[in-house]
Image (cartoon, rainbow, N blue to C red):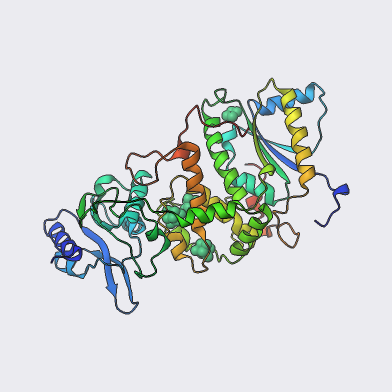
């Protein structure tokens, strides 16, 4: 039986051999680290290094961006990269394309049908409530589309509702405790497909509104601002929370904002449509007005 | 709360758009309407100029409440600015509430250049609400408001 991994290697080999793409961005197993890492395959004979299975947890979408930015000074020819995506990763690629950080024809999207990554007995939260086992956007699809799909319940949303039910003072101390542990390492930002600004406000020397001190208050401002900057564009991939070394429950914040936006402006999920217009960069004259 | 409510006065910051709400406040003043003096007004070109960073920074630097005011929908000097304000404001207000800021401390209002009376009423009611709520505790735990070091001080430059 041919597996998705076999198909993937063959597809990558053909694409490179025929010169349809300059690079295939997929996962390879790194023995020393004992984990699947991003792998940039440029020669057809290296396509056999690619893997696809439950170990492919990391989203490759942000690497498209890092690669383009690093190579932009040396590369003058137009180039095309094929990227392997799970459903959640595909939404990240849509994010980057919609934010006009890459041209559509610079990317060839190889979607893989995914039933969840990580330990099968202890899947990440996002896999347990995944609605996109088939990537919403792709150029080539590997794997069988499942016949029936049901919409799973969302424990994360329930958690958000629970926090909303607390006293405001309890919420303040809950977040103060979490934010006081934040190191401002910015891992959450680096892995985020929505945080694709060429210069981030938190790196800017003269923003006047942000400081780098790691006090609970400054960190609260960091998180509130970052959440607002990705509001309506966050594709709920969970990479920020996965990358955080301090275990700060960032997805509770992102889910809160995403669910508010859906409720307020009746918009579809972010990153599922290449024509999407993020909800906070447009408006309807009939938007809710009762708050003023 | 370390200060007793008796000698504490609410401190509010109001971001008023130049073309409507600031003129409305001006009208309230020239018409000699009485309202509490607790609001420090910051004039902005349009309500959509108010980034969420401004609201957060105001609260952190000691404001007990923040008002964002602009032209009525349809009347923005830049045609559509306040439609964006309206969307963003609802999102940021709910987010801040989620993070532990009392929702009554952040408000928005549409005040036209002719609505001196509305300005008077909005400010009066807002000050009353905040007086009941007491001081905002969205400040450093040690009670000290962060003062940047000398080399960072240019960052605070008044307005360039
Ligand atoms: S990854 Fe975690 S510790 Fe690092 S800046 Fe983000 S929230 Fe803070
Ligand atoms: S879930 Fe986190 S990493 Fe993913 S898009 Fe949203 S903010 Fe960015
Ligand atoms: S935190 Fe804001 S400014 Fe920084 S990269 Fe993300 S969206 Fe851009
Ligand atoms: S100019 Fe008043 S809200 Fe835009």
Q: Nearer the viewer, residue A141 or A9?
A: A141
- Left or right: residue A113 versus residue A210 is left
Within the image, what quadrant is residue A14 found in? bottom left
Q: Is A224 displayed left or right of A200 in the figure?
A: right
Above or below, comparing residue A54 to residue A87 in the picture: below
Percent from the top left, x then y, of residue B49?
57, 37
Residue at 36% x, 47% y is A271
Q: Nearer the viewer, residue A215 or B138?
A: B138
Residue nearer the viewer, B158 or B83: B83
Q: If the image is split into quadrants, where does the N terminus of chain B sit?
A: bottom right
Q: Look at the image and tell me in which quarter the C terminus of chain B lies.
A: top right
Quadrant of the rendered image containing residue A41: bottom left
Location of residue B35 (image quadrant):
top right
What is the number of callouts on the image?
0
Q: Residue at x 34, y 65 (%)?
A: A57
In this view, which residue lies farthest toward the bottom? A32
Residue A118 point in image, percent of width and height = 35, 68
> Which residue is at 57% across, 39% downward?
B89
Reply above or below: B35 against B158: above
The answer to whether residue A111 of the structure is visible from this angle is: yes
Is B84 placed left or right of A108 in the picture?
A: right
Relative depth, front residue between A289 and B59: A289
Decide if residue A201 is in sight here. Answer: no
Percent from the top left, x then y, of residue A30? Answer: 30, 75
């Amino acid at each position: 039986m041919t597996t998705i991994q076999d198909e993937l290697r063959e597809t990558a080999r053909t694409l490179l051999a025929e010169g349809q793409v300059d690079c295939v961005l997929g996962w390879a197993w790194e023995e020393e680290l004992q984990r699947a890492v991003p792998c940039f395959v440029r020669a057809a004979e290296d396509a056999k290094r690619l893997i696809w299975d439950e170990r492919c947890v990391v989203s490759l979408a942000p690497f498209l961006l890092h690669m383009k930015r690093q190579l932009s000074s040396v590369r003058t020819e137009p180039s095309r990269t094929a990227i392997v995506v799970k459903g959640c990763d595909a939404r990240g690629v849509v994010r980057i394309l919609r934010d006009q950080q890459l041209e559509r024809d610079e990317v060839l999207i190889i979607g893989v049908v995914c039933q969840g990554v990580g330990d099968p007995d202890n899947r990440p939260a996002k896999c347990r409530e995944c609605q996109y086992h088939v990537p919403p956007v792709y150029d080539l699809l590997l794997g069988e589309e499942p016949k029936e799909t049901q919409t799973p319940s969302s424990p994360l949303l329930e958690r958000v509702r629970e926090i909303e039910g607390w006293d405001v003072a309890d919420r303040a101390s809950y977040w103060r405790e979490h934010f006081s542990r934040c190191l401002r390492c910015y891992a959450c930002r680096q892995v985020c497909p929505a945080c694709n600004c060429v210069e981030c406000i938190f790196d800017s020397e003269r923003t006047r509104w942000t400081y780098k001190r790691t006090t609970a208050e400054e960190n609260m401002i960091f998180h509130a601002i970052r959440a607002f900057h990705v509001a309506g564009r966050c594709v709920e991939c969970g990479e920020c929370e996965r990358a955080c070394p301090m275990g700060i429950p960032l997805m509770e914040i992102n889910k809160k904002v995403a669910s508010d936006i859906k409720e307020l402006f009746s918009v579809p999920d972010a990153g599922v449509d290449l024509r999407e217009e993020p909800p906070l960069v447009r408006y309807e004259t009939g938007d809710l007005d009762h708050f003023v | 709360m370390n200060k007793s409510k008796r000698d504490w006065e609410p401190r509010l910051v109001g971001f008023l758009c130049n073309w409507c709400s600031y003129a409305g406040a001006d009208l309230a003043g020239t018409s000699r309407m009485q309202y509490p003096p607790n609001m420090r007004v910051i004039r902005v070109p349009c309500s959509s100029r108010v980034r969420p960073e401004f609201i957060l920074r105001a609260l952190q630097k000691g404001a007990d409440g923040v008002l964002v005011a602009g032209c009525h929908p349809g009347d923005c000097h830049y045609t559509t600015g306040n439609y964006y304000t309206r969307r963003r404001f609802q999102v940021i207000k709910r987010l801040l509430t989620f993070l532990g800021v009392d929702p009554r401390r952040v408000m928005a209002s549409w005040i036209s250049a002719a609505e001196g009376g509305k300005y008077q009423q909005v400010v009066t009611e807002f000050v009353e609400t905040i007086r009941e709520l007491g001081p905002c505790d969205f400040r450093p735990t040690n009670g000290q408001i962060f003062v940047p070091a000398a080399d960072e001080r240019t960052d605070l430059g008044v307005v360039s």
